[in-house]
Image (spheres, helix red, strand yellow):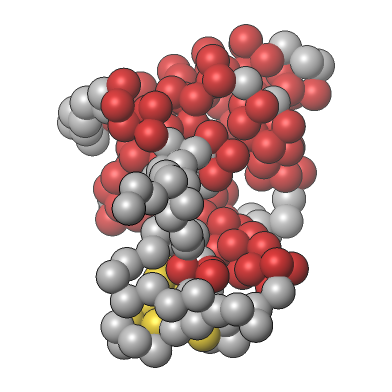
Amino acid sequence: MAKYCSECTYLDLSTGDIYGKFFCDKRLERHTALDLECYNFCTAYSRSSSEIKSAEEYSKNHSSGSSCFITTMICNILKVNDDNYYLNSLRKFRNNVLQKDEKYKSILVEYDIIGPIISKYLSKDPKRYRISANAFYKYIKPITLSIEQNNYDVAINSYMDMTNKLKNFYNIDVNIDMETINKADITLSGHGIYKQKRIAKIY
């Protein structure tokens, strides 16, 4: 099975930054705990499974600030605390509903690939505050209300409408093929970072 950086002895788990990355002592660069192993990978046999899981959770939770466009809108631009009702509702929906059903996989994968691009454009847009405020009141609040009422199809359609409008506004034309979707790890999808499944090695 392919491994992640979290399981490598060269990744210093005491160096986590605000973007969810740790310093690699071998390559002298920063990586998330969820990056796939490279040619320098060396198993950290003394690292416990709880330490590995904690590092991976750290990367998932902190990396979203720069690559998750919804977090960029709410926290970075509108200056709402990260631990708020709306983001927590969306995260629970992702974890407990979307990641549990393969039919939602394409939505999650698109978010991981398109999300960082939208986030980049939005952060540099002079009208970013007005765009974010409009998206918050027109989409985010109604989406969370739909989730609360278990109207999941309504929530998803509203999210897709918002995303498509932003893609069109910033002229983002990225084709995501089925191979890319199939290779994604659904349990790690929807965080604004594309992650592939662990693949068994063939020797």
Choose between 14 and 117: the one closer to the eye: 14
Choose between 121 and 49: the one closer to the eye: 49
Image x and y of residue 124, in percent: 28, 55
Image x and y of residue 90, in percent: 66, 36
Q: Is residue 88 above or below residue 107?
A: below
Residue 31 visible in this rendered orientation of the protein: yes
Q: Is residue 109 above or below residue 47?
A: above
Residue 116 visible in this rendered orientation of the protein: no
- Residue occupying the point 72% across, 12% down: 151
Give the quadrant of residue 104.
top right
Left or right of 8 on screen, residue 53:
right
Image x and y of residue 177, in percent: 26, 23
Give the quadrant of residue 169.
top left
- Residue occupying the point 73% across, 22% down: 147
- Residue occupying the point 44% across, 84% down: 10
Choose between 10 and 200: the one closer to the eye: 200
Image x and y of residue 60, in percent: 57, 57
Q: Is residue 130 above or below residue 78?
A: above
Choose between 125 and 84: the one closer to the eye: 84
